[in-house]
Image (spheres, rainbow, N blue to C red):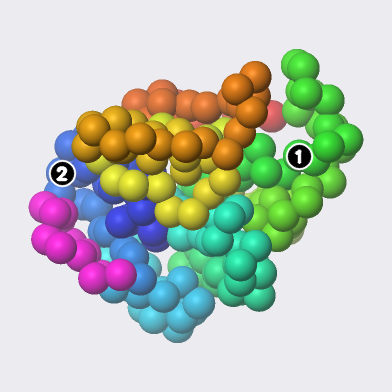
Amino acid sequence: MGALGQIGTELVAELQQRYGGGKVLAIDIRESSGGFRGSFERLDVLDRESLGRLVKEYDVGTIYHLAAILSASGEKKPELAWRVNVDGLCNVLDVAREHGVKRVFHPSSIAVFGPETPRENTPEHTVLRPRTIHGVSKVVGELLGLYYFEKWGVDVRGIRFPGVISSEAPPGGGTTDYTVEMFYAAVRGEHYTCFLREDSRLPMIYMPDCLKFMRLLMDASSDRLV
């Protein structure tokens, strides 16, 4: 899900390289331009019936659910952000439960934190009081993953990602999009004005590391996870 997004574009390519193009189904709400070697299906994550049909038809064993409305875009359309980020996740989890999908990856975000969260050596379990609908939806998403695991045994895994820096696909409406936009502006020889103060510091992750940690998490046996 979200195969044409910033992370999905590179994740699909890596999964196809590891498992073969025929064993990876790429799904997105947008039409593909033909960059996938394997199967591609256009689907809205809010269409639960069609999602279930695809999972059954392709005998899906693992779902990487990356479809989401990010922070900046979510503040413009909070109702849409809730539907996609929360209702869409519920659809994925319900379909996974009903069709026996082995594992689901659903990324969380440092957007779950807020001003009250300790900024240095932030604990795993700490104050989660976000100030964006994206952050609120990610807190709900973490709790939903835990609920579906404890109640029905759906193996849901996720990582709280910071801003992601990549070059293959543009970011999709997050508050840290500027980190990529300034590089694109430099390549075009253009001037870029960033809205942050010069002394601002924010955590970022480079796409190869992002994919590496997703791979390590999803490959880990269940008994190694806490």
Question: What segment carries the magenta color?
Answer: 30-41
Assess whether mark 1 and mark 2 are in contact (beta carbons under 8 angstroms).
no
Residue type at mark 1 is Phe
Residue 112: x and y in percent read: 72, 44
Task: Classify mark 2: helix, strand or loop.
Answer: loop
Question: Which dot, 2 or 1, sits closer to the camera?
Answer: 1
> Where is residue 201 drawn, in percent x and y?
63, 22
Local crowd size for mark 2, using a 10 Å CA cut-off: few (<14), some (14–19), many (≥20): few
The reply to whether the magenta stretch includes residue 208 is no
Residue positioned 88% across, 35% down in the render: 116
Quadrant in which residue 58 is drawn: bottom left
Is residue 32 within the magenta segment? yes
- Identify the main secondary structure in magenta: loop
**Can you say which quadrant of the picture contains the N terminus?**
bottom left
Pointer 2 residue: 20
Residue appearing at x 76%, y 39% in the figure: 113
Tell me which amino acid carries mark 2. Answer: Gly
- Lateral position of residue 160 relative to residue 100, left or right: right
Which residue, as the protein is rendered here, is positioned at the far front?
Answer: 191
Instruction: Please name the residue shown 47% across and 37% down the image.
Output: 193
Q: Nearer the viewer, residue 44 or 175?
A: 175
User: Could you tell which of marks 2 and 1 lies nearer the N-terminus?
Assistant: 2
Give the label on residue 113, or none. Answer: 1
